[in-house]
Image (tube, helix red, strand yellow):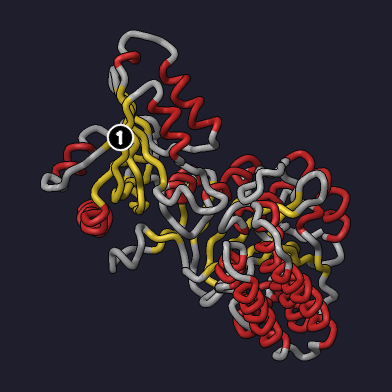
Amino acid sequence: MPDLLKVAKFGGTSMADASAMRRCANIVKGDPDKKIIVVSATSGTTNLLSEFATDITTEKRKSIAKQVRDKHLSICRELIDPGTVTGEIEKLCDELEEIASRKQIMTMMLRDEILSFGERLSSLIFCSILGEITGENIHLLDAREIIITDNNFGSAEPGIEIISVKCAALLEPLIPDKRVVTQGFIGSDKNGVTTTLGRDGSDYSAALFAEAINADVLEIWTDVTAIYTTDPRVVGDARPITEISFDEAAELSVFGAKVLHPATMVPAIRKNIKVYVGSSIHPEKPGTWIVKETRQKPVIRAISLRRSQTLLTVHSLDMLHRHGFLAKFFQVLANHKISVDLVTTSEVSVALTLDSDLNAPGNQKLTEKVLGELRSFCEVNLEGNLSLIALIGNNLDTTAGLSGPVFGALENVNIRMICHGASSHNLCFLVGEGEAEEVVRVLHKKFISVL
């Protein structure tokens, strides 16, 4: 066994083409402790497959299938020995083209099968490239044999215990002697039907593998050099963060940071697995370590921005000095698998935030049926074009005098909702979409840039 057991995940931009894959292969080659390598689909492929899985013509689907085929065969042609892997790529693309030719209703189950082709194709090619670079016999593992989930297609829930059992049987015996390449994002239900963990779920897959094999380190290799104090595209002097706690990173991922999938931190926290975020384009640059306890604990570490928020407000006099209303309200949301971010209440009203893009496949759906059920027992109001801003740090709930400077700096901004005190690691509020970036710049300058 290696001295430190590491799981390394490479995202779509890291799998963009043959040269990008070779960079990643060299990152793996330089560290014998990297034993499990989890890869995403090649950059742009999931978008193509998502379009394939919509209500389009058979000819359009065939055209997309050809694009996918051409894209991956082009990468294969740059291999030293493309023969074997090219045949496997052709076989998979034949399957995709056969699906394109069918006359059938596009179900969520079929959509997951279609989306799985991206990772299945990229992992085949990367396995071959990694073998060329390292000179090793690399084992290609089908993640669907390990990541067993329920059948909530589009956003499947993994079974932690069965994944652990499968890893012990199928993966752990390989680790002493081989490196293993596998796919992110995909799994299968108990009947062997392909499922997906939700868009951008490859980080989560890697974390599930790391948890199941008791890895020491989970590495997330992406196109950014680190986690930053805020989005560098919004604030030019945003700084890379060298070290951040599990709790802070979890809050950042939930409230808008794109570097990590929000679910990634959960398995890492359960097993206290250190997480490293680095750039596959510039691996020499220091990245971000995510650990249980950090050496420094600033009150405000980072500021996140989550766009496209909807504010749902319900009002009912039945709430006044009576019990049961909130249970009834949240049961409706639970029945339709709608998750909520921020919540505030008064005597007769509840306000909460949801992502606006609720009708995208695989996401929660705020349909007329849901709204109708709510309107049967309360007044409902929806307000869109909002952004959620979160200050992430430490002891925000017990730091005296924090709210004054924060909201004093925003005296000319209409703040629609505030959540403070539920967590020691965040202070969140809603503002209009058009004001959001300027709000982030003002707060970053006041609380982070001056340090």
Give coordinates of residue 420: x percent, y percent.
Answer: 31, 33
Q: Residue at x 32, y 34 (%)?
A: 419
Residue assigned mark 1:
381
- Judging depth in this view, the residue of 356 and 2 nearest the camera is 356
Q: Residue at x 77, y 91 (%)?
A: 80
- Judging depth in this view, the residue of 23 and 370 nearest the camera is 370
Apparent side of residue 370 relative to residue 448 in the rendered image (left or right): right
Q: Residue at x 21, y 55 (%)?
A: 435
> Tag 1: Cα neighbours inside 10 Å, few (<14), some, or many (≥20)?
few
Q: Give the residue furthest to the left.
A: 412
The quarter of the picture where residue 139 lies is: bottom right
Q: Is residue 86 above or below residue 231?
A: below
Apparent side of residue 155 relative to residue 368 in the rendered image (left or right): right
Q: Is residue 51 above or below residue 247?
A: below
Give coordinates of residue 362: x percent, y percent.
Answer: 57, 50
- Judging depth in this view, the residue of 16 and 385 nearest the camera is 385
Give coordinates of residue 194: x percent, y percent.
Answer: 74, 54
Apparent side of residue 263 relative to residue 168 in the rendered image (left or right): left
Give coordinates of residue 415: x percent, y percent.
Answer: 21, 42
State the quadrant of the C terminus.
bottom left
Q: Give the residue furthest to the top.
A: 321
